Image: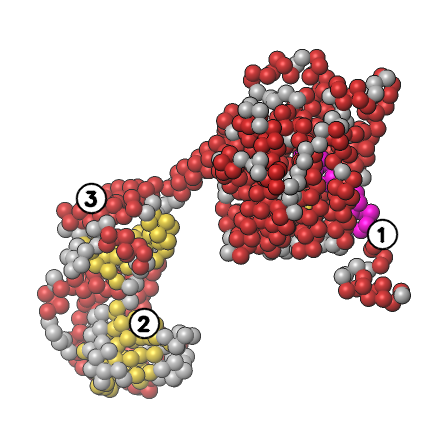
């Protein structure tokens, strides 16, 4: 028998020595969950809905039972405790108040009870579907994109709704400007003031003694102290209920929650009117779940998959909704209390759910023996804690603008409603984000073509000319998402740069490789840029255009087919190369079809013509046909080359077996000198793009030159150093 028991414990990761600590921890967490469930039920079914409180108790306890057990089995945290939570309960209470207000004014009490119950069940079912969709589509991380102040405003608003609900639970008076005098009447003042005192006492003691047993002990002490006062005062239980210190005896005012007759009382049209509020509640629920999971992740030093938590909560809510329960999810406070009480595995969470089930089977009449100051005080305690966190503590942690957004959302929720606060928060957050993002410069870098030449290696004469005339090319590297906030600023900056340039700019190169997209207003700004470029005789050159961006520019009329204003190239290097070609076409030197190498060297090497001819004697002529490989990676670098006529490309082979061009060499260039001087193997491949004529200087011939004509060799080394410096200088600028 002992062997079989050990096998069972090992099968479910339950060592026998941890059984008792987990049961005790689960019972403590379960009792706290039961208290929360009863408080939330009283919150939702407060005021005119109080006669139907039994429905709320059943729904919250069903949710507390099923959500706790399912999450305990599926969560990433072995010590997870889940159940109904204050943030969603506050929103559901506001929805219930709206439904009750519409129906109870018409005397439709049965319809109000059935519709509120349907709202609770529907919220759980649709929340479960929503969370499962987030998990299935791996959208859990996108919740993190909601601005932190907006989250703070939502949670502060939920805290306010809890405080307002606490007034209703304890005194039966709905808090607003019209009822302030009623609340301060002696009969009402004593009720909510006693609850507020208990909440302050909870906050003071728990801030100093945050042990796992303190909260359950204080709640138990609050119950005992209330009954002691009633006994000393000679007030009976029935009299205490009449005075509002205890909840009404539900067994005598029970609402039937079963049968077709109950379901037919549901007001579907009124239920559908709460769709927007339901969506807001699901958003707050997913945010709170993320915050709770992240907090537990940091506390437990355990990496989690947020999508797994979403899936666990989704399944739990779907099961709870089908069973007639209320929405619930992972609770950070109750989970930490569970750990502090000695929990180490999933058994504790299951026990907590079973504790809720025990009270469910005992019946909703249990709440009729619980003092209102205790449950109302718990609501005050949670609400005050939320307001303290987001109104007091956040003041020193957040910038003034973000803190002001929290306060604004809270004020909108308090004055107009939760849904209006959510809409206002998201709208303001979008505007703030647009403003802050517009301050990020759209232009990442700017350069002139003289300082940023293409990788097409040209002749020595052409290289010199482009160093002089390259200021006609203005190169801008753009970044980010282009929208109305950045597009107009960019347009004005480009206009000023072109108009104020000391040298006439004829080519504006826009590298869009880092552009993630643009909106319609940004596309219209580019169309304005086209008209401006046309007026200033400037050609627009777009490179690295994403297909979606290209499509928008075509639709807006910025880029047109067979256009003489706008050009497109797959990469920045080819775009700059095209601009250089246009500049060289206007220079007479370009029209000279062929210049012998001996004449090119005589203009560059500061030595007499006779020595140039001596230098040519050390070179070996070479002719190669198109597509021929001159050298490959790994070949010994025993030669360097002068390209007299033709074209050579320097390429590498990528890991995906695709060829990438590094450089293109035109007539009158020298190449292969880097590995030659380093005496290292070749790193790249040289391929002829055209039939080409070259001259080769071998290492052996260079050594002969250094021996027989040292002055000539020194002049060549000086020329090579000058050429390397000319190539490096633009990258430094």
Q: Is residue 174 visible in the rendered structure shown here?
A: yes
In the image, what residue occupies the spot 19% across and 56% down?
A: 560
Q: In front here: 504 or 165?
A: 165
Q: Examine the rendered structure and indicate whether residue 582 appears above or below residue 153.
A: below
Mark whose residue sits in front, 3 or 2? 2
In the image, what residue occupies the spot 57% across and 54% down?
A: 307
Q: Quadrant of residue 7?
A: bottom right
Position in image of residue 677 (x %, y %): 37, 77
- In the rendered image, the residue lying farthest to the right is 1
Position in image of residue 517 (x %, y %): 35, 52
Residue highlighted by disc 1: 20
Give the mark, 3 or 2, whose residue is nearer the N terminus.
Answer: 3
Q: Examine the rendered structure and indicate whether residue 670 appears above or below residue 728.
A: below
Q: Secondary structure at mark 2?
A: strand
Residue highlighted by disc 3: 499
Whether tag 2 and tag 1 are in contact, CB under 8 A, the answer is no
Residue 170 falls left or right of residue 554:
right
In the image, what residue occupies the spot 26% across and 41% down?
A: 492
Q: Secondary structure at mark 1?
A: helix
Mark whose residue sits in front, 3 or 1? 1
Region in magenta: 21-41
Give the mark, 2 or 1, whose residue is nearer the N terminus.
Answer: 1
Residue 629 falls left or right of residue 328:
left
């Amino acid at each position: 028998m002992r062997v079989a028991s050990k096998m069972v414990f090992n099968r479910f990761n339950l060592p026998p020595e941890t059984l008792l600590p987990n049961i005790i921890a689960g019972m403590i967490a379960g009792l706290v969950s039961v208290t929360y469930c009863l408080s939330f039920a009283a919150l939702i079914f407060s005021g005119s809905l109080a006669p139907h409180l039994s429905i709320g108790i059943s729904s919250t306890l069903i949710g507390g039972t099923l959500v706790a057990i399912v999450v305990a089995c599926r969560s990433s945290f072995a010590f997870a405790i889940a159940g109904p939570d204050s943030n969603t309960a506050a929103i559901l209470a506001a929805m219930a108040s709206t439904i009750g207000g519409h129906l109870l004014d018409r005397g439709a009490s049965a319809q109000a009870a059935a519709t509120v119950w349907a709202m609770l069940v529907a919220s759980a079912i649709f929340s479960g579907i929503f969370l499962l969709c987030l998990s299935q589509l791996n959208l859990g991380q996108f919740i993190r994109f909601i601005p932190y102040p907006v989250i703070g405003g939502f949670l502060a608003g939920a805290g306010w709704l809890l405080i307002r609900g606490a007034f209703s639970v304890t005194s039966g008076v709905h808090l607003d400007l019209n009822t302030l005098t009623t609340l301060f009447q002696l009969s009402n003042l004593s009720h909510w003031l006693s609850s507020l005192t208990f909440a302050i006492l909870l906050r003071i003691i728990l801030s100093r003694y945050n042990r796992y047993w303190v909260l359950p002990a204080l709640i138990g002490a609050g119950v005992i102290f209330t009954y002691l006062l009633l006994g000393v005062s000679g007030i009976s239980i029935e009299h205490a209920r009449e005075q509002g210190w205890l909840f009404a005896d539900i067994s005598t005012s029970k609402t039937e929650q079963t049968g077709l007759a109950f379901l037919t009382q549901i007001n579907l049209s009124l239920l559908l009117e709460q769709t927007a509020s339901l969506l807001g509640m699901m958003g707050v629920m997913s945010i709170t779940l993320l915050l709770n999971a992240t907090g537990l992740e940091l506390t437990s030093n355990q990496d989690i998959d947020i999508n797994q938590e979403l899936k666990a909560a989704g399944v739990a809510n779907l099961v709870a909704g089908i069973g007639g329960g209320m929405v619930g999810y992972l609770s950070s406070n109750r989970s930490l209390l569970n750990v502090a009480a000695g929990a180490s595995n999933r058994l504790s969470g299951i026990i907590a759910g079973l504790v809720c089930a025990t009270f469910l089977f005992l019946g909703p009449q249990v709440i009729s023996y619980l003092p209102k100051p205790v449950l109302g005080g718990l609501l005050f305690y949670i609400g005050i804690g939320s307001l303290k966190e987001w109104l007091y503590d956040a003041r020193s942690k957040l910038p003034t603008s973000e803190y002001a957004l929290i306060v604004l959302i809270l004020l909108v929720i308090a004055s107009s409603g939760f849904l209006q606060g959510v809409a206002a928060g998201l709208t303001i957050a979008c505007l703030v984000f647009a403003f802050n993002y517009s301050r990020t410069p759209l232009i990442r870098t700017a350069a002139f073509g003289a300082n940023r030449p293409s990788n097409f290696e040209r002749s020595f004469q052409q290289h010199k000319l482009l160093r002089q005339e390259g200021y006609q090319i203005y190169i801008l590297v753009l970044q980010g998402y282009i929208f109305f906030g950045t597009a107009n600023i960019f347009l004005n900056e480009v206009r000023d740069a072109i108009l104020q340039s000391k040298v006439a700019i004829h080519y504006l190169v826009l590298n869009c490789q880092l552009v993630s997209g643009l909106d319609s207003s940004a596309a219209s700004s580019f169309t304005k840029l086209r008209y401006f470029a046309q007026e200033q005789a400037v050609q627009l050159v777009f490179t690295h255009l994403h297909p979606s961006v290209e499509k928008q520019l075509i639709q807006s009329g910025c880029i047109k087919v067979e256009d003489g204003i706008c050009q497109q190239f797959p990469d920045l290097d080819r775009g700059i190369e095209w601009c250089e070609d246009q500049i060289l076409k206007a220079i007479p030197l370009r029209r000279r079809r062929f210049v012998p190498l001996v004449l090119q060297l005589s203009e560059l090497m500061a030595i007499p013509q006779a020595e140039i001819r001596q230098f040519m004697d050390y070179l070996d002529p070479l002719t190669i046909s198109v597509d021929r490989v001159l050298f490959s990676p790994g070949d010994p670098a025993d030669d360097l080359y002068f390209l007299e006529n033709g074209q050579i490309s320097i390429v590498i082979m990528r890991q995906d077996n695709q060829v990438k061009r590094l450089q293109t060499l035109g007539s009158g260039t020298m190449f292969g000198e880097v590995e030659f001087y380093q005496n290292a193997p070749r790193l790249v491949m040289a391929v002829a793009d055209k039939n080409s004529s070259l001259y080769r200087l071998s290492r052996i011939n260079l050594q002969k030159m250094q021996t027989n004509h040292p002055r000539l060799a020194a002049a060549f080394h000086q020329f090579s150093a000058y050429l390397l410096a000319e190539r490096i200088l633009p990258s430094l600028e």
